[in-house]
Image (spheres, helix red, strand yellow):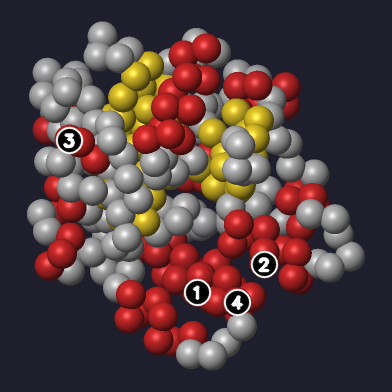
Amino acid sequence: MLTRDKNTVSRHKQVDNPFGQKSAIMKVFAVVFGALFSLACAQFPGGRILESPDAALCASRVIHERTPDGKGYMFSWREPSLRGVEEDWLGGRNYCRKRCMDLVSLETSVENEWIKQRIVKDKVKYIWTSGRLCDFKGCERADLQPISVNGWFWTAVLQKLAPTTDRRQNDWSSTGGISKPQPDNREAQQGGATENCLAVLNNFYKDGVNWHDVACHHRKPFVCEENEDLLKYIRYSNPHLKI
């Protein structure tokens, strides 16, 4: 069963102390444009950046379904303007973030199963999630070692995943392209890119619908999930818009 790990990729002292008595909105601003800026620079060499939300796009964002708790989701393959369009991991994140959303983070078993049901129902081969391996500058902390076991996190919410060895707390597949349990970094072992992003594959290896580590440059459909921090920031900075 998947549960929310209370540990985050950033140390609690580093997250809490700098804010002091600042307002909740200022905390959101710092998270969106402070911590994520440095994280983005580390993750995306070559000039690509993690995009900021766009007020107009946030106001007109498309929601295909909402969960009982009210959170909205957009499925790229259901959106007419995205029909046939697939993005690499960063491209998917940026499409979502411009609309006050982010790639989906499967933080609970309920959400994980809910998303998997829609993948199966819509006959989608695979999707991107916000999951990523913390293998860039700043990830040398002892509690993240070894990175392949303790270094995975949901980037959209800066939430650390349970160790990959704890199979009760995650949904990693038992097999993959080289018949090894996921994550296996198969592509790098075969002379290719590091598999440092997390995708959900639909029975791709006759293994059911499960998590796989995949090189981030591959293009896939994606699911956007409303991001409350981005929504709060845009509502605060654009009070005239109905968002």
Q: Residue furthest front?
A: 68
Say whether disc 2 or disc 3 marks the residue closer to the N-terminus.
3
- Quick check: can you spot residue 96? no
Say whether disc 3 or disc 4 marks the residue closer to the N-terminus.
4
Is the residue under label 3 in contact with that under label 1 (CB below 8 Å)? Answer: no
Q: Amino acid at mark 4?
A: Ala
The numbered disc on residue 233 is 2
Say whether disc 4 or disc 1 marks the residue closer to the N-terminus.
4
Residue labelled with disc 1: 34
Q: Amino acid at mark 1?
A: Gly
Picture coordinates of residue 10 (x, y %)? 33, 69
Q: Nearer the viewer, mark 2 or mark 1?
A: 2
Quarter of the picture containing the C terminus is bottom right
- Crowd tier of the residue under label 1, counting other residues whose Cα lies within 10 Å: few below 14, some 14–19, many 20 or above: few
Task: Name the residue rendered at 28%, 31% in the picture.
Answer: 171
Residue labelled with disc 3: 167
Q: Amino acid at mark 3?
A: Arg
- Quick check: can you spot residue 157? yes
Q: Nearer the viewer, mark 4 or mark 2?
A: 4
Task: Name the residue rendered at 12%, 58% in the picture.
Answer: 145
Picture coordinates of residue 163 (x, y %)? 18, 47
Is the residue under label 1 in contact with that under label 4 (CB below 8 Å)? Answer: no
Asked whether, in this view, residue 74 is left or right of residue 39, the answer is right
| Marks 4 and 1, how far apart at CA | 15 Å
- Camera-side residue: 188 or 197? 197
| Marks 3 and 4, how far apart at CA | 36 Å
Is the residue under label 4 in contact with that under label 3 (CB below 8 Å)? Answer: no
How many labels sit on residues?
A: 4
Say whether disc 4 or disc 2 marks the residue closer to the N-terminus.
4
Residue labelled with disc 4: 24
- Camera-side residue: 137 or 33? 33
- Crowd tier of the residue under label 4, counting other residues whose Cα lies within 10 Å: few below 14, some 14–19, many 20 or above: few
